[in-house]
Image: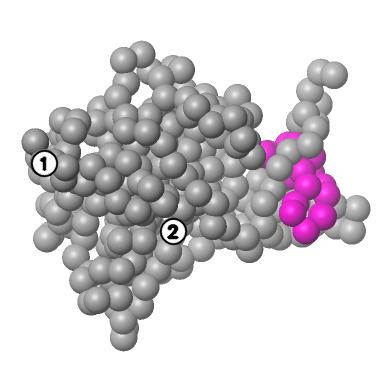
Amino acid sequence: MSDWAPIQRWPAEAIWQAVVPQWPGFSLEILPCIDSTNTELMRRAREGRHEPLLLLAERQTAGRGRQGRSWTGEIGDALTFSIGLPYQPVNWSGLSLAVGLSLAESLGGDVQLKWPNDLWRNQRKLGGILIEAASQGAQSYAVIGVGLNVHKPAATDLRTPAAAVDEFWQGVDAPSLLERVAAPLFDALLRFQSEGFEPLRERFNARDALLGHQVITSDGQEGLCEGVDGSGTLRMHTHQGRVHINNAEVSVRPFSPPIGSAP
């Protein structure tokens, strides 16, 4: 087997059959190793390649998270892929929340969402989302990167303690995880393109890890998290009144139990 042959057995044909009727021209590409699937799809978009594509890497050497943070892992420990789509939503606001909600609902159970782009379980990070966009004339191309911990990473210097899917799904591996989340995610992206975030608001708030918690933002604002509005903007009640946070570079972390919880 060559260095560039996939090591794991991936359900590529099943995913292609499920996705291509709604996204004509869709293809799925699997690589054992690349610097970053998001970076590669952005390279291709700048070259004018705007076909719908799921690009998966069994290992990323320079995977990127939000605010330039790295995402690395050994083969099999994480599921890392990016979706590239010619995309013209009615409103881009809330796209990362819609992606997170689709993933959380596919995983089921007590998986929660931490605004704006993390999946949590028991106050630990299960996965993350990175969304980028490229434009060429009137055409917009969205790149949606997903990273999910299949097994708990060995790193101990993480900003947030890690969770893993194998904690609640016995026998899971990266291919079976991809098969569960991929087709529903493409369905969610199609619906978001025409409907936006508003129809998803209540379902998001039902899984909101911050709702009802006292939170503090990276720029020092403190208050009670009141969930998100119809555009996916975070609402927070402070001593100065309600504020709306829609800057994707704001980091929000809970610093106390939810209001009304036992001490």
- Return the residue nearer the eye: 5 or 245: 5
Closer to the camera: disc 2 or disc 1?
1
* Residue at 23% from the left image edge and 42% from the top image edge: 32
Whether residue 198 sits left or right of residue 123 in the image: it is left
Query: Is 239 in the magenta?
Result: no
The image position of residue 40, as x and y in percent, is 30, 61
Q: Quadrant of the N terminus?
A: top left
* Residue at 46% from the left image edge and 65% from the top image edge: 92
* Residue at 35% from the left image edge and 78% from the top image edge: 135
Sooner in the amino-acid sequence: mark 2 or mark 1:
1
How much space separates mark 2 and mark 1, taking CA atoms?
A: 32 Å
* Residue at 30% from the left image edge and 62% from the top image edge: 41
Amino acid type at mark 1 = Ser
Please tell me whether mark 2 sits on a helix, a strand or a loop: strand
The image position of residue 117, as x and y in percent, is 53, 48
Disc on res. 170? none
Whether residue 190 sits left or right of residue 234 in the image: it is left
| Disc 1 target residue | 2
- Return the residue nearer the eye: 239 or 2: 2
Q: Quadrant of the C terminus?
A: top right
Please tell me whether mark 1 sits on a helix, a strand or a loop: loop
Q: Could you tell me if residue 75 is visible in this image?
A: yes
What crowding class fits label 1: few (fewer than 14 Cα within 10 Å), some (14-19), or many (20 or more)? Answer: few
10 lies above or below 226: above
Whether residue 9 sits left or right of residue 118 in the image: it is left
The image position of residue 3, as x and y in percent, is 16, 42
- How many callouts does the rendering have? 2
Magenta residue span: 203-225
| Disc 2 target residue | 131
